[in-house]
Each structure stands twice: as structure tokens, then as C-alpha cells.
Image: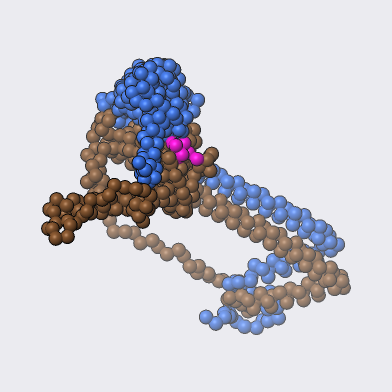
Amino acid sequence: MKRNPITLVTAGILALIFALMLFTFQVRQTEIAVVTTFGKFSRDITAPGFNWRLPWPIQRIYKFDNRIQNFEKKFEQTTTHDAINILITVYAGWRVVNPRLYLESLNGDSVKAEQTLEPLIRNAKNGVISQYRFGELISTNQADLKFDQIETNMLATVRPAASSTYGIEVAFVGIKQVGLPESITTKVFDRMKAERQTRVKQYQTDGEKAARIIRAEADSQANQIMADAKAKVIEITGNAEARASEYYKVLDQNPELANFLFQRNALEQSLKEKATLILDQQTPPFNMMGGQGAGITHSSPLK
Amino acid sequence: MATQSNNSNRGPEPKPRPLSPPPGQPPLLEDAGALALEEALKTSFRIIKVLMAALVIIFLFSGVFTVKPNELAVRLHFGRPVGMGTEQLLKPGLHWAYPYPIDEIVRIPVGQSHTLVSKTGWYAITPEQELSGQQPTPLHFLQAGVDGYTLTGDGNIIHAKATLKYRLDPTRAVSYTFNFAQVTNLIQNLLDNSLIYASSKFTAERALYLDLNAFREQVAQRFNRHLDDLQVGVLVETIEVQTTAPLSVKPAFDDVITAFQAANTNISQAEIYARIATNAAIAQATRLVNDGLTRSNELVKTVASDVSMFTQLQPYFRNDPQLFKQRLLTETMERVLTNAQEKFFVPARTDGKTRELRLQLSREPLRIQPPE
């Protein structure tokens, strides 16, 4: 009996697909897998790609997401080394690195894994925070601040237990939020207000002080500038007098003439403006008017 | 066609049953039904064959796909990315892959900008209040888990909010896509952590108004360091940071700001005064020195000219000192009398007695006493 070749090819393809489904499986880039044979661990697969298998129920494949999973919890209270109660939220990133251990200890259940990680991370957080003072968690002094160290120590504490017991690698642990109990926030607010009032007074006095200093320095500088200028003027005048004195030596040749010239100059300068002169006939050139006129003659410019 | 080919290859077959009765006899009812059934089956098989052929064609061409301009793609061959490093990323254009499940195409939207807000440090506010610009009622306490806030390095409480805009880093898009399960939550946590860390280093004043830029820089710096450490595959476009004092202590902070500004104003005014005073002193000093120079030059030149005149007049004086002096005095009197405002000539009395003159000098006006 002859068969239709297309039917044969189709049947062959279908049989091949069925066989591939039974005997092969893929592990995706984001996955990690465990192969068990009759329920017993056979091998784990940590690299993505094509794999052979024996069909179910001989072999069974367990695939797990090996991407970094996000873990976080809400505020929890803990105590610092100096007995200050704080509220803290941490987050972590974890992923499956040992699928066999993960399967055997947590049944490959991610919810169970997070439930298991929670006390581990809480213990690590409480243990590490209790070793540090509150002033090492928050501080304006770079040398005191141990924020990074606290996170690193929490990670170092939680990592070995998670890895060796559950096949989980905790990739990072970080602090997401730091808070204070409600009653403490009230006290902090009171302190903040008091500090601000002090700060207001400080700004007022500092500003006034700085302004006064600036003004005083400016006045001093101005006085200094004027004093320097006056000194310079005295120096200049002194130099001028010295030079003039050199000229005056010539006058020694004829003191009478020099004296006459000085007096004449002084007379002219002193009667230069708005002078009222009362002259008698002995004053030259009025001495030329000797015997003439019986009364006072007054002469003034146009008004 | 396939049907014909099949028929030609069948070889000897049993003689088919006649489809119609012998001539002269009426057709059998059963034969007619079988005939119709056979026709229907043939038609159905034809349709199924066409559908199968179409499915095969669709299957073969299903491997052709397009990567859009704002995305990249990774081809997973049996679950493993094809290529190494950035070669794994397929750029925009037409590509081909084996049909699923041999190959799988994972598209990565690299062109999109995402926005994420860290509100763990921000006060609780309803969307209605936020839209209307209202603020919640200030309370004298904060409830952890309800009211977000951060602790500053000087032990104060402030509210801080960070708004991140980011997009995927094309060179690290593979890491972003395949290494993290809830990548948005992770980025949110890293941003929260950066905000808390920056706050833990700054004083409240610096974080609130003195040095908000440095505060923002600190948030950005730590956030970028996290992204690099974890190879998240994200590029930061902008990080905006907003801070405010707790609502119940905000007036106290406002007072500080007012005092701070007043102090600065006071200092600025003092600086202005200083500049004016110094400049005035410099100007006055310059004028003083210049006047001194002018006077000195004038003195020297005057003396020089006096001496020059003395030297020139000396020969004439020696000739006849009396005449010389009389001449010069007369010339001088001429100028003096010409310039004088008032001149009184009082000649000697003819009787030889002394003439008496009385001068009435103007006095200072009397002050008017106010009425008691």
C-alpha cells in the first residue's frame, strides 16, 4: 500500500517535534535549571542554551528565574549602639546561583525564598546597626559618616548564610529610608524651632557685626588715604618752598629793592577788591593837590 | 494538482462501484448519499490542505521581523543571545530569525524616556491637594510609613523629593533587559537610597536653601555610582531635587531665611558705604594732592618771576633808587585807586587843625525774641 509522501513528511515532522518536546529543552538567558531523574538530582544548568533530556516522568526539569530579584520591607524599629531607636527600611537584590540548593531548601519557590530572606536581612540589619552610633548613620562630618560601611557590613553578614543554605546570592543591600519614632519627631521639631531662633539671632548679630566692621574699616581706610594725601601735600609744599628759597637767594644782592617790591606787591594785592580808601593829600599822587579843595571829596564807581 | 498526482500514483485499484444504476433502473438512494459525502470530504480536505500550506508559509516567513527606530532587539537562539557584547544588539531595520521556539526576539525600547519620582522623603499629600496646590495640615509630629521624610546630617528632619528622568543605555541594554526582574523597583530603591545618603551628609540649612545644588549633585553622584556598580544599563537624563522644611517648623525656617537675607542686606549696604567712603576719600585725596601741586608750582613760578623781575629792575634801581621807587609806587597807586570800590580824599584843613572823620560801620542785626 503506497502512502502519500506529504502525509509521510508531515507525520515525520510531527513525530520529530513530539520527540524534540520529549527529549530536549531550552534554558533561556534569564533562567537557570535543575534536572532530576526519578526525583533525584542529576545536573544543574547555569548557562542558557539547548539541552537534551529524558522524557517525563523519567526526568523532570525545574527552571528558575536567575535575574536579580527585588526585596524590600517596610519600616522596622532597631536600636543603634548609643541606644537610639530608629526606624529603618532596607532593600536587597538577590538571585539564584545554586539551583540545586535552591530547589532542595526552598522548593524553588520565590515567595518562600523572600520569606526566608526576611529574617536573615532583619538580623543582619539589627546586628550591624547595633554596632554603630546614630552619629555614624547621619553626620555632616565625612570622617564620622559610616553609611556605606553599614550597608557593606549588612551585605557581608547576610550573604554567606543565604548562599550556603539556600543557594541564593544577595547581590546588594541598601538603606531605603531612615526615620524616627513618632514621639521623637515632636522633640526634634521643638529642637529645630529652638535652633532656628538661635540661628535668627546669630544671623542678626553676625550681620550687624560684619557691617560695622566693614564700615569701620572703610572709615579707617578713608582716613588713611586722607592722611597720606596730606602728608604728600606737605612734602610737595616743602619741596616747592625749598626751590623757592633757592630763587630768593638772588634777592640778597639788593635787599632794599627786594623789600620795596614785596611791599608794593602786598599793597596791590591787599587793595585788589572792594577796598575803601581814605586818603589825605600827603599820599602820592594826591600830594600834588596840596592846598586845593576845602572839603572831603568822595568818589565811587557806578552802583 | 496534488490530488491528480496522487491518483496517478496509486496503481491498480479495485474496480469502483458504479455511481449510477444500470440503464433503465432508477438511481439508488444510498449511492446518492455516499456521493454527496465523498464530495463534501474532498472539499474539506482541499480546504485543510490550503490552510496547512498557508500555515507552513506563515511559519517560514514568521522569522522576518522589523526593529523600529526607537528600539533595539536581541535574538535568543535556543534561549542564548546571539553574538557577544554590543554585537548582540540588533539595530533598527529588517532582520530574520528562525521561527519560535528556535529563536526568540526580545525588543528593547531604548528611545523612550522614563520618569520616576522618589517620594520616600516627601510629606503625605493627596492627589487632589497636589493638583490644587494645597498643602496638608501641618502636624507637630511625623508618622513613619505615612509621612515621608529624611534625616539630615545635623539631626534635623526635612522633606526631600527626587524626580529622575532616564532612558536605556544602548550599550548596556542587554544587562537592563536580562539581569533584573523588577528593574523599575530597583531604580526606585537606588534613587531613594541616594536621596537618604545625601541627606545624611548635609545640614538642614544646606539641603534646604544654602546649597541645594550641591545636594542635588550628591544625589546624582551616588545614583550614578549605583548604576555603574550594578551595570543597570540606564542613562540619567536629569535628576531634579526638591526640598522643604517640615510644614510645622517651616515658619521658623522662613524666619531664618529672612534673618539671613536681612544680614546680607546689612552687609551689602555696609559694603556700598565702604565703597562710597573709600572712593570719596580717594577723590578728595587726589584733589588735595593736585591742589598742593598746583599751589607749589604756582609758588615756585611766582617766586621765579619775582626774581626775574628783581634781576631786570635792579640796574634801574641802582641808577636812582628814590626816583625808581616813586615811579613804581605811583603806578601801583594808580592801579589800586582804579580798582578801589570807594575812595575818600580828605585834604588838610586850611586852618591847620586836625580834621575829624566818623565812620558808621554796619552792625549785626538784632535778633527778634520769640513771644513767651
Residue at 57 percent of width and 80 percent of height: A301
The foreground one among B234 and B126 is: B234
x, y (%) of residue B97? 45, 46
Q: Quadrant of the N terminus of chain A?
A: top left
Residue at 38 percent of width and 49 percent of height: B9
Residue B362 visible in the shown view: yes
Range of magenta residues: B76-82
B79 magenta-colored: yes
Among the chains pictured, the one given brown colouring is B
Residue at 36 percent of width and 22 percent of height: A58
| Rendering colour mode | by chain
Quick check: A44 left or right of A119?
right
Vertical side of A108 occupied by B250: above or below: below
Residue B262 visible in the shown view: no
Residue at 27 percent of width and 56 percent of height: B372
x, y (%) of residue B133? 26, 48
The foreground one among B304 and B83 is: B83
**The quarter of the displayed image where residue A167 is located:** top left
x, y (%) of residue A145? 46, 26
**The quarter of the displayed image where residue A138 is located:** top left
Vertical side of A263 occupied by B164: above or below: above
The foreground one among B357 and A164 is: A164
Quick check: B325 left or right of B54?
right
x, y (%) of residue B281? 57, 52
Vertical side of A36 occupied by B160: above or below: below
B214 magenta-colored: no
Among the chains pictured, the one given blue colouring is A
